[in-house]
Image (cartoon, helix red, strand yellow):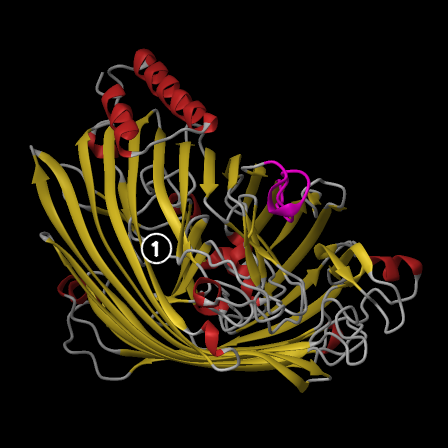
């Protein structure tokens, strides 16, 4: 009865009509009742209460005895008792160091079920796919680097644009990820999930890394840290850490990159990436201040007609508009302060950022403007200020341990965003030029209570509001303002552990904001016709039943059966007059994820992550097209990894499989499946010097990073292809060799 009552309360909190929601609830009740029947008195003792994973990768296990500090191993990062959902977890720095990354944004590939690709130049934000979403460049997946949001609302190229090219993977200490809209701390763009990158405060040794590779790849990284004052006293470091008496540390890094890629028109990517961090304290009491500067420019080979590649009229890595490309800049100043004691905790953070983006793209070639070509330029200048404050209280609810958390999040974006028609980067006509001011605020409360040895609940409520104001320079009639708000309840139930196995039920409402131009504009800037306004905030609802187990020694497994419904679908539009995202009808998704990590021996670990998704529009023949399939919704993903560390040798090999996926609602056009293998081998020559070799696309498979169904006209005098396929080929076999010096 104690289990059935919380499930009944779920029905009161959430009005669920979808048949998959009913299935999920029945499975949850069946699993829990069965396990209680078989093990009514086997709930684990207090010594196996859920553990807390600290920021330094250590684990504190709370019980009736004093806290015990355990050095973290790979198995404990996502151990039983370490998360609030089966699909929630942690990626360690070692996971990023043992496997090769083609691009910085590929660090998100380490999130189980996530697919990271590219449809343009490597200076542009990646394409992301998760749980049957084509997340475009970031919509519906929220990303943060050291507490600073990466996603850009009302972006020149796409709503929620998340460019991770300024990430320095070697500095990442951990990635905390979660999938689904289940937790009150996550707001805009977090319907499908979120990832929070945390940089290190200091390095064990200073580092100089020089990498050379195929296709003109050159990268130099210098990184180091040092205390900036003498130790406050001569006490042992352990005593100092307990008191929070540490010495301030300065970390700095410079990352320089040049590459051309395999493209017929060399990419000519140049990027400068710099970071300075001043920090002090421990995970209990401390602070940090970050300064980041990033500057990149490149030429891009965008997607091209598949038909021309197959006929031999166009080389596989060639472009129809060699003047496409872009540049991007950002400068960030951020800071955070945190304090924690036996009574609770307080966390505050603030940030300010200046961001610029300039993109030249051509996806339809000569369809709209045969005389000049269909290239267009998207320009953005943005200033952002924001921050958050979180207060938590450790308290007691009817004799049960409980933590209540209240949070406030604020953000203001002042944006100038423009769209121009261009020819070889020279403006031909202004389509739109808008000044947008967007202020978003979110407030939430969440309670986490441990009711007994086998039941814990997390109940939350979040409210978000947004105010938009737009001054349209090119089309004054589009000036105006709008606002919206949304209330989002959240609930999680964690059962167990029994026999090193725990069970989860999660449910919650999420949302994404819409582009202010689509919310406020009255006239379509590309056609001149009356525009159909969209709401400022669009809701979603998700549920998940999950299990996590370590019943088999050395094997960590989790499985999640989930559903996620969205009130409105944002899809990428390849029309050169728009080149952004546009709203479509509501959607329904459900799927299954199965993640496994095995420590096979003291030197070898194996990972296998599998994900299957069923994605459909809610209404058949919606959006003026036949069928209900969601274009670019990947329905099967598999990742298989082996990492090793034996003496002076280390490295890893991974294979990622992506199934075929529909390009049109009726499934008449499909993208082919792909399987790509990458290899890294490292050798420590001396304590100070190591060498590394990456082999990307080890078996030189020909595949496509992305494919789209679209209209286009490939030449000035050719015919319009009404339902063609354009593709961005994946990169071929390439080598990268690095020398790493510690000093």
Indicate the secondary structure of the residue bearing disc 1: loop
Residue extending farthest top: 37
Of residues 319 and 209, the one nearer the viewer is 319
Task: Decide if residue 195 is on the left or right side of residue 371.
Answer: left
Instruction: Identify the residue at horizontal 75%, vertical 67% (top origin).
Output: 364
Query: In this figure, what is the number of numbered marks?
Result: 1
Residue 59, placed above or below residue 17: below
Residue 231 at x, y percent in the picture? 20, 78
Main SS class of the magenta portion in the image? loop
The image shows residue 262, relative to residue 137, as above or below, that is below
Q: Is residue 48 magenta?
A: no
Q: Residue at x 73, y 71 (%)?
A: 301
Q: Residue at x 61, y 43 (%)?
A: 637
Q: Position of residue 116 (x, y in %)?
A: 59, 57
Q: Nearer the viewer, residue 42 or 743?
A: 42
Q: Is residue 660 left or right of residue 743?
A: right
Q: Position of residue 475 (x, y in %)?
A: 51, 77
> Would you say residue 630 sits in the magenta stretch?
yes
Residue carrying label 1: 187
* Image quadrant in which you'd find residue 275: bottom left
Q: Nearer the viewer, residue 227 or 93?
A: 93
Mark yes or no: residue 488 visible: yes
312 and 383: which is toward the camera? 383
Q: Position of residue 543 (x, y in %)?
A: 40, 35
- The span picked out in magenta is 620-635
Q: Quadrant location of residue 528? A: bottom right
Q: Is residue 258 visible?
A: no
When the figure is inspected, residue 35 is found, relative to residue 181, above or below; the finding is: above
Instruction: Name the quadrant of the N terminus.
Output: top left
């Amino acid at each position: 009865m104690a289990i059935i009552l919380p499930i009944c309360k779920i029905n009161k909190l959430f009005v669920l009509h979808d048949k998959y929601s009913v299935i999920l609830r029945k499975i949850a009740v069946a699993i829990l009742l069965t396990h209680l029947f078989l093990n009514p008195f086997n709930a684990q003792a207090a010594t196996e209460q859920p553990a807390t994973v600290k920021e330094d990768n250590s684990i504190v296990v709370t019980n009736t005895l004093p806290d015990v500090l355990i050095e973290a191993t790979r198995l404990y990062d996502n151990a039983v008792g370490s998360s609030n959902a089966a699909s929630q977890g942690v990626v360690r720095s070692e996971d990023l160091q043992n496997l090769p990354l083609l691009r910085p944004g590929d660090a998100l590939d380490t999130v189980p079920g996530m697919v990271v690709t590219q449809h343009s130049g490597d200076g542009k934000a990646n394409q992301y796919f998760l749980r049957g979403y084509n997340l475009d460049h970031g919509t519906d997946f929220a990303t943060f680097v050291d507490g600073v949001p990466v996603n850009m609302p009302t972006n020149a190229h796409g709503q929620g644009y998340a460019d991770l090219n300024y990430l320095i993977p070697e500095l990442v200490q951990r990635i905390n990820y979660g999938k689904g809209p289940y937790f009150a701390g996550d707001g805009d763009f977090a319907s499908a999930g979120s990832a929070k990158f945390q940089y290190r405060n200091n390095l064990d040794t200073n580092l100089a890394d020089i990498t050379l590779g195929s296709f003109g790849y050159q990268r130099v990284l210098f990184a180091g840290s040092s205390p900036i004052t003498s130790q406050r006293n001569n006490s042992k470091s352990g005593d100092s850490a307990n008191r929070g008496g540490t010495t301030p540390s300065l970390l700095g890094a410079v990352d320089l990159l040049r590459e051309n890629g395999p493209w017929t028109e060399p990419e000519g990517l140049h990027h400068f990436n710099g970071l300075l961090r001043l920090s002090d304290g421990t995970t209990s009491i401390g602070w940090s201040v970050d300064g980041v500067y990033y500057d990149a420019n490149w030429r891009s080979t965008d997607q091209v007609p598949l038909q021309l590649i197959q006929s031999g009229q166009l080389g596989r890595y060639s472009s129809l508009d060699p003047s496409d490309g872009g540049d991007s800049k950002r400068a960030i100043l951020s800071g955070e302060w945190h304090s924690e004691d036996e009574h609770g905790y307080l966390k505050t953070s603030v940030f300010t950022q200046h961001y610029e983006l300039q993109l030249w793209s051509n996806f339809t070639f000569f369809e709209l403007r045969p005389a000049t070509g269909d290239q267009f330029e998207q320009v953005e200048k943005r200033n952002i200020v924001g921050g958050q404050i979180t207060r938590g209280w450790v308290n007691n609810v009817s004799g049960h341990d409980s933590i209540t958390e209240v949070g406030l999040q604020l953000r203001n974006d002042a944006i100038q965003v423009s769209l121009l028609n261009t020819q070889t980067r020279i403006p031909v006509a202004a389509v739109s030029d808008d000044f947008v001011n967007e202020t978003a605020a979110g407030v939430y409360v969440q309670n986490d209570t441990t009711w007994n040895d086998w039941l814990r609940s997390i109940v939350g409520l979040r409210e978000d509001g947004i105010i938009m104001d737009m001054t349209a320079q090119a089309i004054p009639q589009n000036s105006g303002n709008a606002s919206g708000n949304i209330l989002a309840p959240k609930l999680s139930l964690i059962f167990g552990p029994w026999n090193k196995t725990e069970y989860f039920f999660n449910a919650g409402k999420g949302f994404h904001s819409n582009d202010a131009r689509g919310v406020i504009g009255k006239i379509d800037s590309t056609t001149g016709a009356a525009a159909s306004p969209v709401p400022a905030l669009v809701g979603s609802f998700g549920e998940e039943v999950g299990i996590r187990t370590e019943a088999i020694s050395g094997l960590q497994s989790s499985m999640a059966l989930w559903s996620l419904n969205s009130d409105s679908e944002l899809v990428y539009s390849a029309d050169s007059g728009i080149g952004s995202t546009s709203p479509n009808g509501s959607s329904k998704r459900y799927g299954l994820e199965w993640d496994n990590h095995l420590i096979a021996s003291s030197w070898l670990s194996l990972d296998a992550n599998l994900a299957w998704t069923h994605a459909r529009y809610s209404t058949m023949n919606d959006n003026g097209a036949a069928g209900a399939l969601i274009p670019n919704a990947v329905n099967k993903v598999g990742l298989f990894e082996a990492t090793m560390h034996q003496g002076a040798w280390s490295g890893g090999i991974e294979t990622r499989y992506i199934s075929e996926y529909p390009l049109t609602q009726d499934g008449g056009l499909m993208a082919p499946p792909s399987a790509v293998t990458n290899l890294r081998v490292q050798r420590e020559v001396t304590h100070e010097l190591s060498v590394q070799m990456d082999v990307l696309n080890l078996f030189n498979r020909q595949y496509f990073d992305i494919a789209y169904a679209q209209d286009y006209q490939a030449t000035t005098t050719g015919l319009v292809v009404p339902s063609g396929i354009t593709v961005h080929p994946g990169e071929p076999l390439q080598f990268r060799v690095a020398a790493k010096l510690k000093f």
